[in-house]
Image: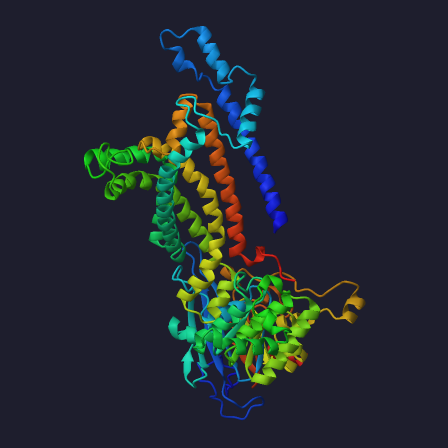
Amino acid sequence: MTDAFVSRLARMAVTLAIVSVTGFLLLHLAPGDPLAQFALSPGMTATQLGAMRHQMGLDAALPLQYLRWLGALLTGDWGRSFRDHQPVLTIILGHLGATLELAGTAALLAIWTGAAAGLYGAFRQGSRADHLITVASIILLSIPTFWFGLVFISLFSVRLGWLPSGNIHTVGAPFSPADYLKHLILPATVLALASAATWSRYTRNAVADVLGQDFIRTARAKGLSPRKIRSRHVLRNALLPMITLAGLQFPTLLSGALVTETVFTWPGIGRLFLDSLEYRDYPVAMGILMFSAVLATAGSIVTDALYTVADPRLRQARP
Amino acid sequence: MTKSPTGHTAFPGAVPGAAPEAVPGPASAPLLSVRKLAVTFTQSSGPDIPAVEGASFDVRPGETIALVGESSSGKSVTAMALMGLLSSGSGSGAGPVITGQALFRTSDENTVDLLSLPEPALRAIRGRDISMVFQDPMTSLNPVLTIGEQISEVLMTHDGLSRRQTRAPVISLLTRVGLRNPEDLISRYPFQLSGGMRQRVMIAIALACRPHLLIADEPTTALDVTVQARILTLLRQLQAETGMAIIFITHNIGVVAQIADRVVVMYSGQIVESAPVRDALDTPLMPYSRVLFRTVPTYEAVLARRRHLPTIPGHVPDPRHRPQGCTFHPRCTHFVHGPCDTFRLSPEHATPDHEVRCARWREIARD
C-alpha cells in the first residue's frame, strides 16, 4: 500500500512537471506581450519599458525564466500578478470558492439526474424511455456548452425574464441566499448538462453490463426480489466503474466551468484564467494551470483509493 | 416416466402416476412432472428459434436425472425454463414463449405448474424448493460480497432469519459442503477461493433451504478433473443425507454413469431417449444415443484406435432450419427414406421404463 502510494506520488510529480513545462512554453510562445498595455500609455519611454521588462524578469532566456519560476514555486512562492501585484495564490483562492460552488452544484445535478436516467434505462432496456434517454444523452453530448449557455440566457433571461443572465449576485444589492441561488441556477444547469449525459450513458452501460453477469442469474435463482437484486447485487458492482467516472469528470467540470463562467460572467477560476491569458499575466495563468493540474492528479489518487474501498479484489489479500 | 398402457403412443397428456400396472423403479409419485415443454425464442426479424420441443419427463423424489446432449441441444434452456429464469426478471425483453406444463410438488405439499406460476410465487420456490448450481463458479458468485453474505441472503429471504441468526446455519452449511475453517471463510470474498471451493460455496447456497430438487447445470465442467470427482462425490453424499432429487445437466457421459439413476438424452431441442441409467448405457436404442455413449474415450479404445476417436459425422442442425422428420436423420447411419424424414416422431415406450424417439428402434433393438 505505501509502495503503491509512493509510486503514485512519483507519477503525480512527473505529470505536474510535464504540465508545467508545456504550459510555460505555450504561454510564452503565444504572441503578445505582458507589457503591451504599458507600451500604449503616453510618456512611456523605451528605457522605462526595458527597465520594467528587466524587473519582471522577462528579458532573461526562457529556460532561465522557467527555472526561476519553478524554484520560487518549490519554495511556496507562486509569484505575483503582472496586473495588480497581488500574490497569485491569494488571487486563485479568492476565485476558487465561486468555481467550487458552481462546479459542485453542477456535479450534484449531473450525478443525480444522469445516474437516475441511466439506471432507469438499464432496468428497462429496449423500452421507449430507454431509447429516449439514449438519444437525449447523445444530443446533449454533441452540442457545445456555450451554445446551451447562450440559448438559456436568451430564453430564461431575455425572453421570459425569470433568471438573471450573469454574475454571482445582483450588482449593488446586499448579499442574500435567494439572490445567489437565482444566479446559480442557469450556469449550474448548463454546466451540468453534458456531464449528466455522460453520467447517464456510463451508468446505463455499467448497470446493463452487471445485469448480464452470471452472478445476477445466481441471485435470481436464489429467489431474491428484483429490488433486493438491484440494491445488493447490481448497484454494488456498477458502483466500481462509476467511481472511475467521478474521477474523470472532476477535471472536466473545472474545464467546463471555464466556458460556463465566461458565458455567465461568473467570477471563478475559469474566467480568471481567460482574463490572465488576455493580459498575458503569466504568473496567474501558470498558477491556475498548476493548481488545476494538482487538483486533477489528486482527484485520480482519491479515485484509486475509493476504488480500493469499494472493490475487495483490489484490497490486499489477507495472509 | 409416463407409463402409457399402449406402449407406443406419445405422452397422451397423461396425469402423473396414471399407469395402473406395476412398473419397476421408485413407486412414489413424481416430484416434478414435465409435459410437452416447448421453448421458442422469437426474434423481431428472422424466424422463431424453437430451443426445446415437446419435452416430457418425470423426476421422482430422491432420484437423479441426467440430462445429456451436445451443446445447444436444449438442456440448459429446459432447466432455465423450469426455474422461470429465461425472461429477464427486470421487465426488459419479453423472453421466449414457453408452453407446456411442469407440475411440481412444493414443500408445503401444493402441486403447482412452474410454467404458469406468476413471478412472485415462483420466487418463493426458487432457492427454497428448487435450487440451482451453475457451470462456472468463477462468475456465478458476486465478486464484491463476502461468502457469508451470499449464503445468508438465501436464509434471510426464505426463512425470514436476521443476518445475525444466519451465522450458525451458514457455518454448518460450509462445513457440510466440506470446506474447512468456515468461520474464517464467511468473511472472505470469492476471488480468494479456488474454483472447487467456490463451487462448494455455490452448493452450500443451493442447499441452504433444504430444496427437494437441485438442478445442477454442468456443475463440474469448469473444474479440474480431480476437483470434478470430489464435487460429484459431495453431491451424491448430500443427496443421500437430504433425499433431494437432482437434475444433472451434462455433456460428460463419464459423469452420467457415476451419478444418474435415469438418463434423458436431448438432441436438437427434443428428448430422443429416456431410460434407467443401465439400459441407457448398455442398450441404447436411439442411434444418436448409441453414438453418444460410444464417443466416450476409454483408455483401451484410444490405444486401440491410435488417437482415432469416434465422432458423429455432420453437426447439430441449426434450430431455425431443422430437418423434416427425425432431426437426427441427416447424420444417422440407420436412416431410411420415408419413416425417418417424413413425420416428426413421438416418443414410444420400448419397455415401460424406456422411451425412445426413433422410427426404427425395433430393428435396432434386434441387432
Can residue B117 be seen here? The reply is: no
Q: Say left or right for A317 vs A76.
A: right
Question: How far across and down, in percent of the image, does residue B73 sit?
Answer: 55, 66
Q: Quadrant of the C terminus of chain B?
A: bottom right
Residue B190, placed above or below residue B363: above
Examine the image and state in which quarter residue B279 appears.
bottom right
Does residue A112 appear in this view?
yes
Residue A278 image offset from top left, x and y in percent: 40, 22
Towards the viewer: B237 or A235: A235
Closer to the camera in the image, B175 or B284: B175
Q: Is residue B255 left or right of residue A282?
A: right
Q: Residue at x 46, y 52 (%)?
A: A206
Question: Up-down: is B22 above or below A163?
Answer: below
Q: Quadrant of residue A87?
A: top left
Q: Quadrant of residue B272?
A: bottom right
The residue sitting at 46% across, 85% down in the picture is B16
Residue B64 percent across, percent down from the top left: 58, 80
Residue closest to the far left = A160
Question: Residue B99 at x, y = what percent?
Answer: 42, 71
